[in-house]
Amino acid sequence: MTEKFEQVYARALADPQGFWAEAAEAIEWDRKWDVVLDADDAPFYRWFTGGMLNTCHNALDRHVENGRADQAALIHDSPVTDSVTSFTYRQLRDEVALFAGALAARGVRKGERVIIYMPMVPEAAIAMLACARLGAVHSVVFGGFAANELAVRIDDCAPRVIVSASCGIEGMRVIAYKPLLDEAIELAAHKPESCIILQRPEERATLVAGRDTDWREAVSAAKPHDCVPVAATDPLYILYTSGTTGQPKGVVRDNGGHAVALNWTMKNIYGVEPGEAYWAASDVGWVVGHSYIVYGPLLHGNTSILYEGKPVGTPDAGAFWRVISEHRVAAMFTAPTAFRAIKRDDPQGARIADYDLSNFRTLFLAGERTDPDTLHWAEDKLGVPVIDHWWQTETGWSICANCIGIEQLPVKEGSPSKPVPGMEVHAVDENCQQVKPGDIGALVIKLPLPPGTFPSLWNGRERFIEAYLEEFPGYYKTADAGYIDADGYVYVMSRTDDIINVAGHRLSTGAMEEVLAEHADVAECAVIGVEDKLKGQLPLGFLVLNAGVTRDHGAIVEDVVAMVRERIGPVAAFKTATVVTALPKTRSGKILRGTMQKIADGEEYKVPATIDDPVVLDEITKSLRAIGYAKTSGEQG
């Protein structure tokens, strides 16, 4: 049944050079590579050494030249501004070439860095592609990030130019970006030479004379710029991810391996053909936005949707179904938390019937573990395959996925399926020995990683080894914990620091969350480990209830405690849960379990710059105090 997938997977591991050289033939090269996989500087492996290409040419110009000039390349759908704007491949190429000219006029050349601090507007994608056109290195920082966090990134990558906007719109809130940008530049030791500011009608920004230029004025004075060939091993972008020391890690992506891998994934993992509409409901500030709003779909000749809105509230729980219907989306990629929000507001999925979803074939979920309840709800209501897949900022694309473009495997709830071709995943103990099937261990990937993953960190070769390679020699440390079953399916249970130790028993908070999510009244949940003098740690649950639930909260808590006792056993010592109206999350939908744990244990903590709504932490603190936790004052460190 799975012979075809198994054959492809085995070939990718047995002959990675031949496998990826074949995939690379789908990309246009200015000069072919000398070596497919260069191990001369291991563990800093490089792909397609000696090759020359331009990523922007492959994403835009070659499609214009090969018959897709009038096909929609990018559709900006913005319910918050009540507008839809579409760009053909020709129109997008022309806009990008002009903005590349505007950047070049400000001294941006191959290898120069440009920070992009933008909301979900077409100009964000245009700026990214314009940097790629010049061979410049872009670093997108999530629009609205705190000034001090932006300042750290300015100092680390030293941009010549910063591209920003006057404001972003989060739901119904207008957030002024320019004051944050000005403060960040004031805080930073490195000063950019120029800033280009997109003025939005919702909030006009004051420009600094001699440094800032209005986007439209910059473009009107520019001349189109051609694509600049770069080495396959030259950096395309830097994307910062949180570091354990508080210093962000600048994940680097190269040009050659990135273009080859992402183009390959569109057909083989996501099962879409060139010309079809593909929608990643994420943000350009995150890796998903880089890989699957901007680069992947355009490299493959798809129509990509850039959505400025929310799954609920813009205007309601039918927002996603409208976008899928209006733009004839074939495949969608979003976070499980988005579907939990839709399920909470529309538990019966009644809004789905209002829209024609006949073109919609597949839903992909990633970003957090997909609990079985959310998986089944989406399957039942949409009637299409729901594919959980697992990947990270560092990998840039899937580690594990059900590769429906090769062969759709049976779905196992709770698992993102098997490792994709090129990824050899193992579960190991602290001595780097493989554990038995079904036993929890650290999930690691055998080196070398395939193309499209990160070759290193920006200005951080030693940190790269220390953070990812040192603990498990010969492997990349994912920092996720889980197990692999007898059939080779991987189960990602939690981050390694979410494995809690209850009286000597190593237990996964993710397994407990699966049980809690099955309760009919629970829309969303989280479990953390809190300090206990007797047992070391005890699990503590947080429950967000479905809209309209009127049952006594105490009775619901009793239910879930009994469910965990029945499913996992008394060994879990799960005795306490509390009902809250919302869970604190990053803007990409990840639940801030570590911050919640610090609050519960009375430790000082820092409010993460990525938090979606800081007010939620206040409610969490009050709820914890009501049940006897978070007794110290001065929570924010």
Image: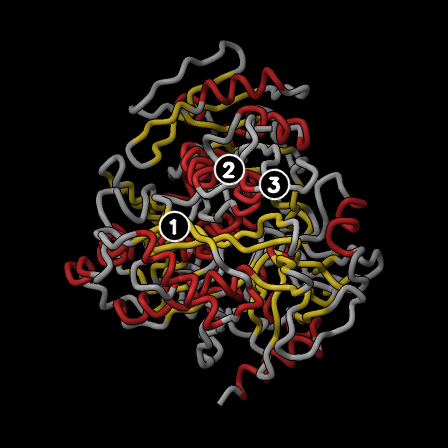
User: Position of 1 compared to 202: left or right?
Assistant: right
Which comes sooner in the sequence, label 3 or label 2?
3
Q: Which residue was labeled with disc 2?
A: 610
Q: Position of residue 144 (x, y in %)?
A: 46, 30
How far apart are the alpha carbons under marks 3 and 1? 29 Å
Q: Secondary structure at mark 3?
A: strand
Amino acid type, callout 2: Thr
How far apart are the alpha carbons under marks 1 and 2? 33 Å
How far apart are the alpha carbons under marks 3 and 2? 12 Å
- Residue 285 visible to the viewer: yes
Q: Nearer the viewer, residue 364 or 134?
A: 364
Q: Which mark is residue 240?
A: 3
Q: Position of residue 562 (x, y in %)?
A: 42, 66
Q: Which mark is residue 426?
A: none
Could you tell me which quadrant the C terminus lies in? top right
Q: Nearer the viewer, residue 409 or 208?
A: 409
Alpha-carbon neighbours of circle 1 within 10 Å: few (<14), some, or many (≥20)?
Answer: many
Which comes sooner in the sequence, label 3 or label 1?
1
Q: Residue drawn 72% across and 49% down? A: 456
Alpha-carbon neighbours of circle 2 within 10 Å: few (<14), some, or many (≥20)?
Answer: many
Instruction: Using the image, determine if residue 560 lies above or below residue 582.
Output: below
Q: Nearer the viewer, residue 208 or 53?
A: 208
Q: Residue drawn 38% across and 56% down? A: 557
Tag in front: 1 or 2:
2
Q: Which residue was labeled with disc 1?
A: 89
Which comes sooner in the sequence, label 1 or label 2?
1
